[in-house]
Image (cartoon, grey):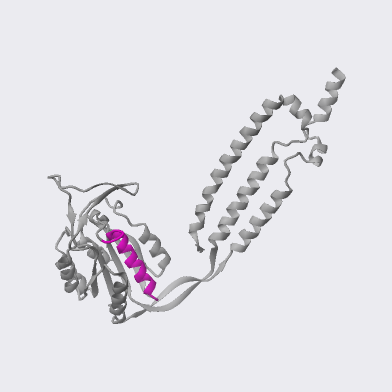
Amino acid sequence: MFVLEEKIWFWLLLAIPVIILFFLFLIFWQNRTRRKFADSSLMKFLAPNRSRSKPIIKLILILLGITSLVIALVNPKMGTKLETVKREGVDIVFAIDVSKSMDAEDIAPSRLEKSKQLVSQILNTLGSDRVGIIAYAGGAFPQLPITTDYSAARMFLQALNTDMISSQGTAISDAIELATTYYDDEQQTNRVLFIISDGEDHEGNVEDIANQAAEMGIRIFTIGVGTEKGGPIPIKRNGVIQNYKKDNQGETVITKLNPGTLQEIANSANGSYIEGNITNEVTDRVTEELQNIEKTEFEAKQFADFKSHFQWFLGLALALLFLDIFVLERSTAWVRRLNLFNERRKKGVKDEAE
């Protein structure tokens, strides 16, 4: 199993097309300048050792060297063996509201981004618990099944956005119903569901579904994100606000946090409601609640003995860039002596004809 530790360095690969464009422009400029100075036959006489292929070879070496250096900076790691370990923890599912109202910026940077920050911080406090992720708006869709891979959880978490589900609304009942399928051990009682939402425009008979979840041993904690004062819903294009959502009368829609709904859901499923505006308070409260829940032992398979392999790519990068120094932009003497294209013979025939 491979793990890329610092993926941000992949942005340096954007330099490659820039270098290629610069090289093409340089070749074009050189050829145009030579044509102004002398014709092709005279240039062959003045510069008989000039090679057309060497500049391309030098470019390839530089590009391969840069690519190898970037991979070295990313620091690829590989797990050398798969181990089965005993762990104790709680099965936690995060159901995150991705409806359009979560784009409101009454809490910075937006309700959805704040929700992602909260879940990310909660993941940082977990030790051996298993986690899963659900996204919901007008319907609920699984994003990540129960796993101990927190890196995968963060990756799926960052991919959440309000455009991923076309049907709009806040189907909390669907999210709860889907979450019940995440817990695979019938004997397990330490099941926790965190619902992160603004609680607005919820659909379905949520309380009945929450009661059914409680009967299955699922405790539901709700985290309210937003303010009761509310804010408009921005309509963005390429990350820039173009307008705000309006109702049928042309008035700007103001979306507000509805803590009452979230409190009712939590009370129905032996949980509690948590105000989600201050990250540290949320993580402290979540940590406290999870400490009071009995943990169950389970087996988890994971790769162990991850080893860094950046040194191979760093060595290759240095070797390629070092080799580039010795590749001159003139034809190689021993290649000319091979006379691969019978140039001497053609020249001799030409001389006899003259």
Q: Is residue 346 above or below residue 335?
A: above
Q: Is residue 85 above or below residue 109?
A: below
Residue farthest toward the top in the current orientation of the protein: 354
In this rendering, position of residue 203 left or right of residue 109? left
Q: Nearer the viewer, residue 268 or 247?
A: 247
Q: Position of residue 138 (x, y in %)?
A: 22, 55
Q: Is residue 184 visible?
A: no
Residue 123 part of the magenta segment: yes
Q: Position of residue 264 (x, y in %)?
A: 15, 70
Q: Which residue is located at x 81 percent, y 35 percent?
A: 339
Point out the stretch of residues depicted in magenta. 107-127
How many numbered tags mark residues here?
A: 0
In which quadrant will I find the C terminus?
Answer: top right
Q: Nearer the viewer, residue 200 or 171?
A: 200
Q: Is residue 191 visible?
A: yes
Residue 187: image quadrant is bottom left
Residue 179: image quadrant is bottom left
Q: Position of residue 262 (x, y in %)?
A: 18, 67
Q: Nearer the viewer, residue 19 or 132?
A: 19
Q: Which residue is located at x 51 percent, y 54 percent?
A: 10
Residue 279: image quadrant is bottom left
Residue 72 part of the magenta segment: no
Residue farthest toward the left in the current orientation of the protein: 249
Q: Is residue 140 above or below residue 252?
A: below
Q: Position of residue 326 (x, y in %)?
A: 74, 48
Q: Which residue is located at x 73 percent, y 37 percent?
A: 51
In this rendering, position of residue 2 left or right of residue 51? left
Chief SS of the magenta region: helix
